[in-house]
Each structure stands twice: as structure tokens, then as C-alpha cells.
Amino acid sequence: MNQDTSGSSAGMPGEADQRPGDRHPGGPRPGDKNKRAGSGSGGAAGRIISLTVCFLCLVFIAVSALTGFETGIRMGKNLGSFLLTMVKILPGAFILIGLFDVWVPRHIVERHLGEASGLMGHLWMILLAGTSVGGLYVAFPMACALQKKGAALPVIFTYLGASGICRLPMTLFEISFMGAEFTMVRYLVSLPLLVLSSHVMGTILQKRGFELTAP
Amino acid sequence: MRMVKEYEPGIDSFFQIMVKITMYLLYILTGLCLLLSFIKSRRKSAQALKIAWKKFSRLVPAFSLMLVLVGIALTLIPDRLILEYLGGRGIWTAAGIAALFGSITMIPGFIAFPLSGILHAKGVAYMVLSAFTTTLMMVGVATLPVEQAYTGMRVALVRNLISLVLALIVALVTGLYFGELW
């Protein structure tokens, strides 16, 4: 119901959203951007390739629909239903991310999710991930917004992992079809390992000055 | 104590309703937050919407590539094929194939879990199903375009590899817990 409003009322791209002072209180981390510049992440070339692939795919589906090629038609249907899910989720999710960006003060994020937050930071992130919708494709923009406000990398990796592991609606499905024990074993094994691996990976990357960059 | 439901295509409208409720909750929450925000400051709210649009519009290429990958994966690996491949095999082979399928495709939970329910009724081991559903949730080959836009390809690959290892450990422990390995 809100898709239209979100799209049109916000339809003014190209404004800088970076307020000075909102990024890295400890000063910028030189070298990081340059290090990854060559990896082709989100660059203009990457965008053109992505859009070309999509265009070719749409042409393929259109041709299949005209000639009655069944695999192509099925692909179109699959793509369409997934697109529909995304169209339903994304406007709400991105508006919430935008509001978070504007309203939540940096010091709160830093205190609860920053480098000194320890295990509690991980727990908060598991709770946040558990109650969020969508998959990784929503978790990444959110993670990026969190990092901009001072959340530490280990905690962010826990959020990304947990958004796959323990989203609440999915867990309810799992329990009803697979049984509570199945879910319990999965939670008890995966969450501690996730926190451990996020801690190791996040700490190493943080030392190297790595950070998520918005495309 | 274990309540495993049989999969009946007509009956799971309950779950469709649950998905809808989640969606309504998302929009009620978004609406309330937006309303409060507008009451407090129109300027800041406009800024929030601008940020939302900007973040979204920049992700469109990555999103569309992800859509195509999901479309291809769902078409090449339809539910029937999964049913066919996981039944009547050794547990280790089946778990390997399950992990592969789970990593590549991106099936929503309200299809994947009922499907696993049928598979279990057909005698597929919990370990195999765990390998399937856990990789489905944790490893995302299809979401790599979105992920690499934020972290670069190397970190994205490492993160997914670690997730794969975690998922396999989960599957293994599930197999041990349900006594399927001895």
C-alpha cells in the first residue's frame, strides 16, 4: 500500500547524505578505499554489466513468452514472484533505514554496539536480526547504516549472519514443519559459532581498516 | 513432542497469512515511525526519505542482478529436482548435494520448510534436511552481487565460506543429535 508514496515522495536522488562529523570520529582511515577500488565493487562498470545481464535476461524471457519456450516462461514467473516479494519489503525497509540514519544519535549506537560493547553488542544484533524482515539484501544496507553510526565490525558480522539464521517468521515455519528440537539444535550450534567467527573475522578486518562502503 | 506437519498445498494458507501479517507489521511500524518523525521535524523526515531513496536507487543494479540469479537458480533447480535428488541416497552424498542446492538457490522459508517436511515424511534424514535449510539461510550465492557491492568480492567470498562451514557443522551436529550417524 505504501509503495507509491515512498517512491514518489522521495524521488530526488543525488543529494549528499553524508553529514560531516558522522563518520569516523577517530579520523578517516586512509588507504582503505584505494585498496578496494580495484575489486570492482559497485563501480560504474559493474553497474553496466549488471544491467546488461538483466536486460538480456528480460529479452530472453520475452522471446520465450512469444515462442512458447517453457523453461524461459517458468524463469519469468520465478523472477516475477521474487520481484514481487522484494517490491513489498524494500520500501518499508529502506524508509526505516533512512529514519534510523537521521534520528538515532551516534553515541547510543556507539555505546551499545561499538568496540567496547562486548558480548552484549552481539546479543543486541541477534535480537535486531531476529525481528527484521527480508534477507541479506535488506541486512546489508542496514549494516552499512549501523557502521556509519559507530557499530564495530565484529558486531556487524554477527548481525549479517544472524539475519540469515534467526529471523522470527522463518523460525516459526521451521518449528512447525521440522519440530522444535531441530530448531533448537540449529540455534544452539550456530549462534555461538557465529559470534565466535564474527569476532575473529571482524577483529582482523578492523585492524586492516576495512569497512562497508555504500555502493 | 515433535510436531512435524504433513505438507498439504491447500492447507498452508495459514502460513501465507502469517507472511502477510509480518508484512502488515512492517508497514504499520514504518508508518508510525514516519508519522512521529514528521510531527517532530519535517525537514529531518524529508532528509530521511531522501537517504532511503538514495540508498535504494544505488542498489538497483545489484538487486536486479540478484533477481536474475535467483530466477535462474529457481528454474534450473525446481522443487521436484530437490525431491528427486535427496531421496534414496547415502546420507553423506545426500547431505553434500543438499548443501550445494541450499547454497545456490534462494527459496523463501514458507516453501523450503514445507518441502523439507515432505522430504522427511519420505524418509530423508534430518542431517540432510539441515544441510539444505541451513545453507539456504546462511550461504547466498545469489545475494553475492548485493554483498560484494558493500564489502568487495574477497570479503564476501570469505564470509560465505565461513557460513558454509558453520552450516555444515550444524548439519553434522543435527545428524549426531537425532542418532542418524550410528
Image (cartoon, coloured by chain):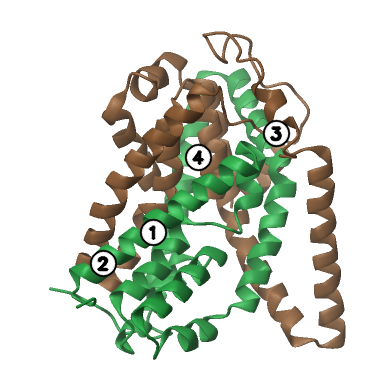
Chain colours: A brown, B green
Residues packed near mark 4 inside 10 Å, few (<14), some (14 to 19) or many (20 plus): some
Amino acid bearing label 3? Lys
Q: Nearer the viewer, residue B81 or A1?
A: B81
Q: Which residue is mark 3?
A: B54
Chain bearing mark 2: B
Q: Nearer the viewer, residue A80 or B146?
A: B146
Distance from disc 1 to disc 3, alpha carbons, whole Å, reads: 34 Å
User: Which residue is the extreme one toward the left?
Assistant: B1
Distance from disc 3 to disc 2, alpha carbons, whole Å, reads: 43 Å
Q: Is residue A186 visible from the viewing direction of this image?
A: yes
Closer to the eye: label 1 or 3: 1
Chain bearing mark 1: B
Residue drawn at the location 66% of the way across and 56% of the way down: B66
Which label was assigned to residue B31?
Answer: 4
Closer to the eye: label 3 or 2: 2
Distance from disc 2 to disc 1, alpha carbons, whole Å, reads: 10 Å
Q: Which residue is mark 2?
A: B174
* Above or below, B17 relative to A47: below
Percent position of residue A177, x then y = 30, 74
